[in-house]
Image (spheres, coloured by chain):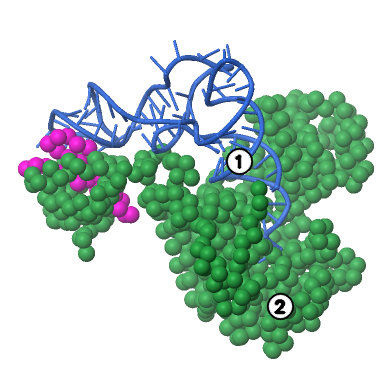
Chain colours: A green, B blue
RNA sequence: GGGCUCGUAGCUCAAUUGGUUAGAGCGCCGGACUGUCGAUCCGGAGGUUGCGGGUUCGAGCCCCGUCGAGCUCGCCA
């Protein structure tokens, strides 16, 4: 060991002890005859003092120290005089009077100073990620991530779950996200796919009788990225046999409570609230509601359908809806210009306009208020729960557009008006998702969750009449507007599974080819089973109240899925390609 | 694939309507200094304004293209 103590662990209890510490030079203050170094490691800072009367050579060497140099210093821990205590750092009551200095690695001038407080642009941070990761904030995120994983493993282990590793090199399957492919050298022209999730393997583990499985599993999806999406991410993957939906919900309720307790030290009330998919869409406009604040969507179609405002009226006549939200007390906080910006904002979701009214002296104040008579104005104010000073927004459009536009507007206003505490966590279950959605592009029904999800037994009659009405035995766990877990009761009957493949237009030969192993397994004694997967990255984000997934991943990729540090992906040698029987057909400019 | 924002010194940013030699703070280099902790003081170096083209008497600023980063719609069972 090159050190006897960590920088951040020294306290006044170590007074008079001779210690050796190692770390990075965080800052230096050179007074000529007296040199102060703040030495940093993962655990904190300690001030090291070099006095020529302690050791002239060490003092002389300390004169050359600069930021981010890695050093080893030996000396006696000394209580600081009361007037010299630095309350800003944990070890501020003490310092190390160095009698020896060893420069372990003289650092080049770094492209940025990780602990200066001004954070450089992300491009630079990602290129020099190893320097960026010296920032205590990122170290905190990685440590929390580790703690969370530990809590997850403890929770499941205590309940007889077994963590099983499943293959990274698997089979490409239709449905779902685009696969990352890995060419096979020994099977010319054939490819493995990296897992989008261990979905099929975990079901096969149930057939194998593992009964209770979990895995902290890396998953890969080759789709366009977002602030909360990386091409490779981590799932807490769970599957159980001989259980139904209720058992999964209860098990995961317990897991969430355990995670919150482990990370935050606080208790969360169980069971977690539940809401149907239909209710979420109606009240919040999306299937992942942020329930930390109100401002729920209100339908005012019945009031405006025969009003003098043509936009509202014709919208209703054409099968659309008029819905609105009430930004309490925001009438003076949004200028005409701000509202124009909001109009453009909802335009991104297909809304052709954004009607707004300020509630003023008990009436509506707006360029379009004149189209609504007194009775309608009063009815609107009442329905929206309007009070003087409120700002009402309405979108008149096709139902889906009103949902999407108002859901996003609500989130934006909630954030801008600071309607919630960013540290608060409000998880809830969203249940009764539709099993199928109409895929206009492919002109067929397709599975909303995945094709292994069991239909709600009450809805089987809709297969022939109205497939969009079939509810799935699936469930999402939503927290603060993020989908952070998703699962379902699986099909364990090969006949039903075949029927579903038929229904989504997967020809039986193709189903046999792509999923034959699953259908086969279901024929060999498959227990009823159900499962779920939690997005680990998103949970870490939630616990840190962070909205950027890259800040909770040690080595993340950019939006174009490249690694700025290693410069992956990259071209490879012609020899490698030949071995893989691959020729590149690059796009021509 | 579409929309929007950004790119100026090592870093964070500024630069009036398109107008002289592109500035500041931090950092860096040299010097001074025995109690600092965002040390202080004195001096200094540091720029192909991402790249390419265009408009103009004149471009960091306007236009077109391109590269990169971010946000987002589509996409993500």
| Residue A157 higher or lower than A412, as above or below | below
Q: Which residue is mark 2?
A: A515
Figure disc tally: 2
Horizontal side of B6 relative to A19 (left or right) equals right
Horizontal side of A165 relative to B76 (left or right) equals left
Residue in the picture at 30% in, 53% down: A41
Which residues fall within the magenta stretch?
A29-53
Q: Is residue A108 visible to the viewer in this orientation of the structure?
A: yes
User: B50 and A96: which one is in front?
Assistant: B50
Q: Which residue is mark 1?
A: A415
**Chain under numbered label 1:** A
| Percent of width and height locating residue A350 | 77, 43
Which disc is residue A533 wearing? none
| Percent of width and height locating residue A253 | 59, 66
Horizontal side of A547 relative to A492 (left or right) equals left
**Chain under numbered label 2:** A
């Amino acid at each position: 060991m090159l050190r006897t103590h960590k920088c951040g662990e020294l306290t006044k209890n170590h007074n008079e002890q001779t210690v050796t510490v190692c770390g990075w030079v965080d800052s230096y203050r050179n007074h000529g005859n007296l040199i102060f170094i703040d030495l940093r490691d993962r655990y904190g800072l300690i001030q090291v003092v070099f006095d020529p009367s302690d050791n002239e050579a060490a003092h002389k060497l300390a004169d050359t120290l600069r930021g981010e140099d890695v050093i080893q210093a030996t000396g006696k821990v000394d209580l600081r005089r009361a007037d010299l205590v630095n309350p800003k750092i944990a070890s501020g009551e003490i310092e190390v009077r160095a009698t020896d200095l060893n420069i372990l690695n003289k650092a080049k001038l770094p492209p940025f100073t990780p602990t200066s407080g001004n954070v450089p642009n992300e491009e630079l941070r990602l290129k020099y990620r190893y320097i960026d990761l010296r920032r205590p904030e990122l170290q905190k995120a990685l440590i929390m991530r580790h703690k969370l994983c530990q809590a997850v493993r403890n929770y499941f282990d205590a309940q007889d779950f077994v963590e099983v590793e499943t293959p990274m090199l698997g089979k490409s399957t239709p449905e779902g996200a685009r696969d990352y492919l890995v060419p096979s050298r020994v099977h010319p022209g054939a490819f493995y796919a990296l897992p989008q999730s261990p979905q099929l393997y975990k079901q096969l583990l149930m057939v194998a009788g593992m009964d209770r499985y979990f895995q902290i599993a890396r998953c890969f999806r080759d789709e366009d990225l977002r602030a909360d999406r990386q091409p490779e991410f981590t799932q807490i993957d769970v599957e159980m046999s001989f259980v139904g939906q209720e058992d999964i919900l209860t098990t995961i309720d317990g897991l969430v409570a355990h995670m919150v307790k482990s990370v935050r030290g606080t208790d969360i009330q169980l069971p977690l609230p539940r809401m149907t998919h239909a209710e979420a869409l109606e009240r919040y406009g999306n299937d992942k509601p942020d329930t930390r604040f109100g401002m729920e969507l209100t339908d005012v179609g019945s009031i405006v359908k025969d009003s003098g405002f043509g936009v509202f009226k014709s919208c209703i006549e054409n099968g659309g809806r008029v819905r609105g939200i009430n930004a309490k007390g925001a009438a003076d906080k949004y200028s005409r210009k701000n509202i124009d910006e909001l109009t453009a904002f909802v335009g991104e979701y297909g809304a052709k306009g954004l009607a707004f009214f300020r509630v003023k002296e008990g009436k509506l104040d707006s360029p379009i208020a004149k189209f609504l008579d007194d009775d309608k104005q009063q009815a609107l104010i009442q329905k929206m729960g309007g009070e003087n000073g409120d700002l009402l927004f309405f979108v008149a459009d096709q139902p889906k557009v009103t949902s999407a536009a108002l859901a996003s507007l609500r989130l934006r206003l909630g954030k801008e008006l600071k309607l919630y505490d960013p540290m608060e966590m409000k998880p809830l279950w969203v249940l009764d998702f539709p099993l199928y959605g109409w895929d206009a592009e492919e002109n067929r029904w397709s599975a909303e969750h995945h094709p292994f999800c069991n239909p709600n037994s009450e809805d089987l009659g809709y297969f022939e009449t109205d497939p969009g009405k079939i509810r799935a035995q699936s469930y999402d766990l939503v927290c603060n507007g993020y989908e952070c877990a998703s699962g379902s009761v699986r099909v364990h009957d090969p006949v039903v599974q075949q029927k579903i493949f038929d229904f989504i237009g997967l020809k039986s030969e193709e189903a046999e080819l792509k999923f034959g192993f699953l259908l086969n397994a279901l024929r060999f004694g498959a227990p009823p089973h159900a499962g779920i997967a939690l997005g680990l990255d998103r949970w870490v984000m939630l616990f840190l109240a962070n909205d950027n997934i890259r800040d909770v991943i040690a080595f993340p990729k950019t939006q174009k899925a490249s690694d700025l540090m290693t410069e992956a992906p990259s071209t490879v040698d012609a020899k490698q390609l030949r071995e893989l029987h691959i020729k590149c057909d690059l796009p021509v400019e």
